[in-house]
Each structure stands twice: as C-alpha cells, then as structure tokens.
Amino acid sequence: MTMTTDHPPMITPADDVPGPEQGRWTYKEYALVDDGKRYEVMNGVLLMTPSPGIPHQKTVFELATYLSSYIRSARLGEVFIAPIDVQLAPDVVVQPDVVVVLNNNLDKITPTRIIGAPDLAVEVASPSTAHYDRREKCDAYARAGVSEYWIADPVARTVEVFSLEGGVYYVVGVFQGKAVVLSRVLPGLRVSVEQIFAMV
C-alpha cells in the first residue's frame, strides 16, 4: 500500500519568470506577466503564491459578504476580493484576500489596481502562507500605512485584528466563537467569528 503525504504548496521566489533580476521587480514588469499563475512582488522580489483551498475560499466569501453588506448599506466605501492588485509601493504589489477602501480614499482605486494603502486588508491564513502573512505582509502593510489588518484562521477559527499606531501594528484582539470582531476602521460592524466560519 502506497502512502502519500499532502504537503501544502508554499510561497516561493518565481526565479524562472522572464523579467528583471530578483530584487528589481516593480508593478510595471509584474503587470506584463500573464501565465495564469498567482504572483506578488515583495521588496522587488517576484513571488509565486499557491492557489487557495476550499476552507480558505469559503472564509473569504463569508468575510466579503458581511463586510460588503455593512459597507454598502452604510455607504462607507468599496469592498474587493482577490485577485486584485494593491500597489503599496513601486516594488511591493500584493493581493489581499479582502480589501476595504473607504470613501475618503476612493481616489486610490484605478481601472487596473489600488495604488496606495487601503483602509483595511484581510488575509485568510493557511499553513503555506501563515508565516508570510505575519511577517513580510504585516510589515509591508504597516510601512504603507494600512490602518487595520486582519488575519482570519479557518483552522483555529479565530480573527486577529491589528491596528496601526505610529507606524506600528498593535493587537486589538484575537476573537473567536460568539465574540464580535472589534474594528476601529468599521466601528459599526457587528459580525461574530462563528458567523464568519459558519460554512467552513
């Protein structure tokens, strides 16, 4: 009997993609890559990101549904889901799972991408991206001035909320179960963690 181990695909440098040498990628070169794969640019390095699994996608859908319903009804701004390019700097291009841009920043939305810091970025963690989401992406969001950052974990069934103060994120809370997610960017939002993960 043959046993197989299902290792999750990892985020890896895309060294074989034609273009500038690693460390010199910008949005201009990134936008020319059209091979059907998922990429991000972090500090000039082109990275290949794995396709999301089913629990990830269900979580993204639920998060986007609740956020969109609240934001549209209150006419606060716009909500987007991946894939959407967010250019945080010339050499930093990411695709958050869910992005919120409030009315005061709608001028950052262009026909091709969001240029500059959105008000809220949400990443749904997976075993293959957890370290990247907590280190490189967290640092990039803070440097760019993203006011609030959430990490939703379908395995732990938690939502961790980070708020930016003085260019540094501090943890607002790690929410689970019946707890309502506390957002400083969206103070009127009333969604519990169990609602977010209800379909996972």
Image (spheres, rainbow, N blue to C red):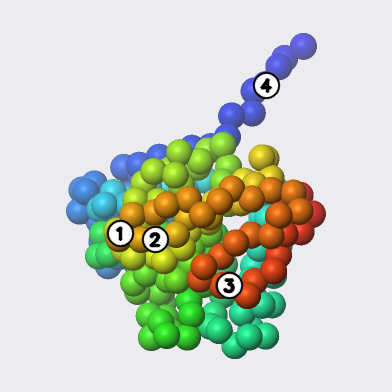
Q: Is the C-beta separation of discs 2 and 4 under 8 Å?
A: no
Name of the residue lying farthest toward the top: 1
For mark 4, give the secondary structure. loop
Q: How far apart are marks 4 and 3 (CA)?
A: 47 Å
Q: Which amino acid does label 4 sit on?
A: Thr
Q: Circle 4 sits on which residue? A: 4
In the image, 26 versus 80, the foreground residue is 80
* Discs 4, 3 touching: Cβ within 8 Å: no
Indicate the quadrant where residue 147 lies. bottom left
User: At x 51% / y 41%, what residue is drawn?
Assistant: 130
Q: What's the distance in space between the residues labelled 3 and 1, CA to CA?
A: 21 Å
Q: Is mark 2 on a helix, strand or loop?
A: strand
Q: What residue type is labelled 2?
A: Leu
Q: How far apart are marks 1 and 2 (CA)?
A: 6 Å
Label 1, secondary structure: give it.
loop
Can you give x and y, in whole percent of width and height, for residue 132 in the image? Answer: 43, 43
Horizontal and vertical percent position of residue 174: 59, 48
In the image, which is nearer the foreground, mark 2 or mark 4? 2
Does residue 188 sit above or below 148 in this rendering?
below
The residue at which mark 3 appears reads as 187
Q: Name the residue under label 1.
A: 167
Q: Position of residue 22 (x, y in %)?
A: 24, 46
Closer to the N terminus: mark 2 or mark 3? 2
Cα–Cα gap, marks 2 and 4: 43 Å
- Mark before the other along the chain sequence, 1 or 4: 4
- How packed mark 2 is, by other alpha carbons closer than 10 Å (few <14, some 14-19, many 20 or more), is some
Any mark on residue 164, and which?
A: 2
Q: In which quarter of the image is residue 93?
A: bottom left
What residue is at 67 percent from the left and 85 percent from the top? 73
At a point 42% along the width and 47% down the height, the residue shown is 48
